[in-house]
Image (cartoon, helix red, strand yellow):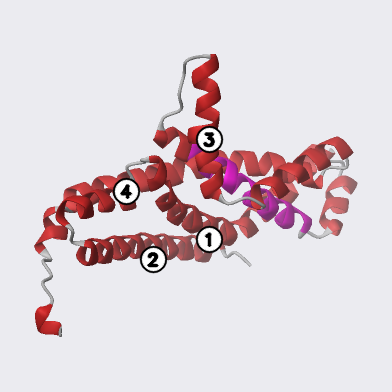
Amino acid sequence: MLENLNLDWSIPINSMPLLLSGIKWTIIIAAVGLFFGFIIGAVVGLGRTSKNKLLFWLSTIYVEAIRGTPILVQALYLYFGVNQVLQQTVGFRIGSETAGIIAIAINSGAYIAEIVRGSIQSIEKGQVEAGRSLGLSSFKTFYYIVWPQAFKRMIPPLGNQFIISLKDTSLFAVIAVGELLRQGQMVVATTFAAFEIYTVVGLLYLVLTLTISLVLRRIERRLEVD
């Protein structure tokens, strides 16, 4: 049976420049999306810890709505649904790469918000009281005492979120984003070397995630994250 296999590993080797361009977009979309996702998550996470009921409920609705729907649906909604409205009203469309970045930012923002909330609430109240007793304002107590400790505790789950978001970019092949999987599909469509190409694509994703994991472990050790 094995003798009948006709595998050509020169195809993925020759297609490596195209696959590497896909890796470039995979990293760009994940990194830029997570950058804005962290900003969204930090704001929403603070809202989730706020005593202001309006901020709390608005933040909660956002988190539950986004976490309760698949990122693929969110990407399709942005690229096809929102674009339909924009095209009909202002004659403007969101590009596929931009839609992917926005989808990662909005989706990861909801999960990062919970990471921020949990990290802030994990800081002992006694430290807040100590800061206040030293004459620090609420803002300074948070900025100098709570946030630095909370941020260190965010690093491991933020790293996990980065890996998840990196892999989620593969879903954007359905909206023609030129990321790694999309480039692999294009090669398969012309060469029919599905086994060889998807094997290499899977290995490239594995290399990316393992590299990120190793970097994050070194960062955690350097910061001595508890």
Q: Is residue 157 visible?
A: yes
Residue position for label 1: 160
Q: Residue 210 bears which disc, if any?
A: 2
**If the image is split into quadrants, where does the N terminus sit?**
bottom left
Residue 35 can be seen in this image? no
Q: Is residue 221 above or below residue 86?
A: below
Using the image, determine if residue 64 lies above or below residue 79.
below
Discs 4, 2 touching: Cβ within 8 Å: no
The reply to whether dot 1 and dot 3 touch (C-beta < 8 Å) is no
Label 2 vs label 1: CA separation?
A: 11 Å
Instruction: Give the CA distance from mark 4 to mark 2.
Output: 21 Å
The residue singled out by tag 3 in the image is: 78
Residue type (three-letter) at the residue carrying disc 3: Leu
Residue 79's x, y, as percent? 48, 34
Q: Quadrant of residue 46?
A: top right
Residue type, numbered disc 4 = Arg
